[in-house]
Image: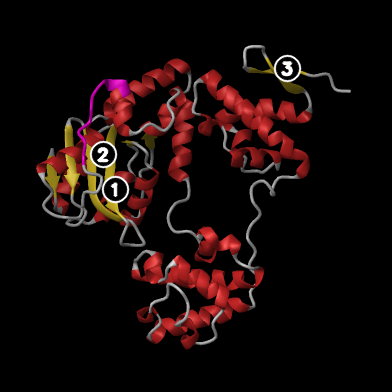
Amino acid sequence: MIWIDDDSSLNDFIDQAIASDRYALDTEFHREKTYYPKLALLQIRVGESTALVDPLAIDPSLLTRLFEADVLCIVHAAQQDLEVLQHASGSIPRRIFDTQLSAGFIGMSTPSLASLVQNELKISLPKGDRLTDWLRRPLSQDQQKYAASDVDYLFVLHDSLMKRLAELGRATWAEQACEELRTRPSGPQDPADAWLRIKEVRTLKPHSRGVAQSVAEWRERKAMHHDMPPRRVLSDIALLGIAHAMPHSISDLESIRGLESRQIGGQVGQEIINAVAEGRNKEARIPQSDHDDVDKEFRPAMSLIAAWIGELAREHQVDATLLGTRQDIMDLLRKSKTSRLSTGWRAEIVGKDIERILSGEAGLSFDGRGRLRLLPTTLQ
């Protein structure tokens, strides 16, 4: 295990990684006190060497050279890591193999790294403090050992999983799923939609929703600009109170619950009033729920198709969420061009069966042992 805290050493290690056929990667980060995730540590394994890279001391953009190389990056549960890396370095690995995601194709449901290592390798990973401050320097030997363990076994897991995936004929499925994960949009969402992430927003009366949308958008942009959590700018309770009261002046803000006097002094108070004024005449609609968004004629099919996906998941020993989510079913029913059940490996396992069910060419029945089966029908 080596510690890298200068650009020259990082470039040398990147040279080794690019010359290899794969490297393992993990990150430690914090986002409790910031809007954007703060990269605190980067773990990279190449061959038999594990490097702990200090992103506080090096130029993270140097990682772009590694990420753009045609070298396979082995990761575990990479969705948040990809967001962190994109923000810190401006890029993400060109090719990935996610061990957690790929394990779903051999019947494991989103296993943690510790459980996957224990199950596949019979090794117990060292336990660490989940509340560790990874931004503090220096890191203790125990902290470094714990961090290194996140990548030390990824190559062995990759080999083990690939062998089993190849035996089952599912290596291509895993490859496609990993590419879906890699290219999935991440990072900040549209500030105009920030109000929809407030739990109690559906309790607002229609005339208050425009105010909630405008104030939440102002809060989100303020948080992004100052790199702080939105609730440190303005609490949800205060935001909902403002939406209810629709204040006309800074003095009106003083009686709103959850709004402290320090938050409405000077420019901020006026910015809130301006946002309220902007939203007062705005018509903001809450999107229909998934249930309402499906044509009435297809609603009975939702449960039926979900049951069949569950049956196929058991039959193929694949995590059901990989086969198809509720959103996937809706996209198929709506004949969306982006339907995941209509292309690739999902169409092979699930999509074609569902098309037959929807067209009336096939139906579902119990086999007498509590399992579902697909039967051809005779159309009238």
Q: 214 and 55: which one is in front? A: 214
Cα distance between the residues tagged 1 and 2: 9 Å
Cα distance between the residues tagged 3 and 2: 52 Å
Amino acid carrying mark 2 in the image: Ile
Residue 95 in percent (x, y) is at 38, 38
In terms of secondary structure, where does tag 3 sit? strand
Which numbered marker is on residue 130?
none
Question: Where the C terminus falls, by quadrant?
Answer: top right
Residue density around tag 3, few if under 14, some if 14–19, many if 20 or more, within 10 Å: some
Q: Are marks 1 and 2 in contact (CB under 8 Å)?
A: yes
Residue, far top: 368
SS assignment for the magenta stretch, majority: loop
> What residue range appears in magenta?
119-128
Please name the residue that numbered disc 2 is placed on: 18
Amino acid carrying mark 1 in the image: Arg
Please name the residue that numbered disc 3 is placed on: 375
Residue 280 in percent (x, y) is at 61, 78
Q: 257 and 333: which one is in front? A: 257
Cα distance between the residues tagged 3 and 1: 54 Å
Residue 288 in percent (x, y) is at 66, 54
- Give the mark nearest the N terminus, 1 or 2: 2
